Image (cartoon, rainbow, N blue to C red):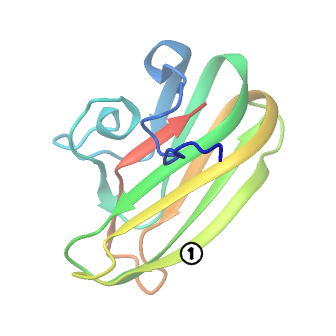
Amino acid sequence: MRKRLMTQNTATDHRWLDLEKLAQVEVTSEDASHPIEFALLPGASGAWHAADPGEQRVRLIFDQPQKINRIFLVFEETELGRSQEFVLRWSPNADAPYQEIVRQQFNFSPPGTIVEREDYRVQLPNVSVLELQIFPDRGTTTRIASLTQLRVA
């Protein structure tokens, strides 16, 4: 019998775009002790946290349009139960309307459910802008948004 061991498909076994070299990043707010680099750069420890409560956006603006095949996101919440939603969109240029990729809602229930991982296989040609909109708690506007990882391939 022929057999082989299947490997898990995680954020560590893929060739991710070097966002530091290929894109500018815009954030609606940022806690100085939790910068966006924590979520975007491989090997960084920690997570991005917004400075202000409520809805937040993280926008990647590529220097040159990119073909994107995969988007990997990780959100973590270890302290408070809440219902979070995010919307992922893209645009072929800064002036064009955004096209929605996915809208996802999930619940954190510490200490049980504290991590949400999303791994999307997509076929997006000529992406100039990729935007992540986060609603950290659908029931209130007092929660702070955070993002542990955003990887793009």
Q: Which secondary structure, mark 1?
A: strand
Report x, y in % for residue 133.
56, 56
Query: Is 43 positioned to the left or the right of 98 in the image?
Result: left
Residue 12, picture quadrant: top left
Task: Say which residue label 1 marks.
Answer: 105
**Quarter assignment of residue 3:** top right
Q: Is residue 148 left or right of residue 130?
A: left
Q: Report the quarter where the C terminus lies.
A: top right
Measured along the vertical axis of the image, is residue 136 above or below residue 101? Answer: below
| In the foreground, 59 or 8 | 8
Q: Where's residue 150, x and y in %?
A: 47, 42
Tell me: 11 left or right of 96: left
| Circle count | 1
Q: Give 111 or 77, whichever is nearer the viewer.
A: 111
Name of the residue lying farthest toward the front? 1
In percent of width and height, residue 98 lies at 78, 46
Q: Amino acid at mark 1?
A: Gln
At 28% from the left and 82% from the top, the residue drawn is 112
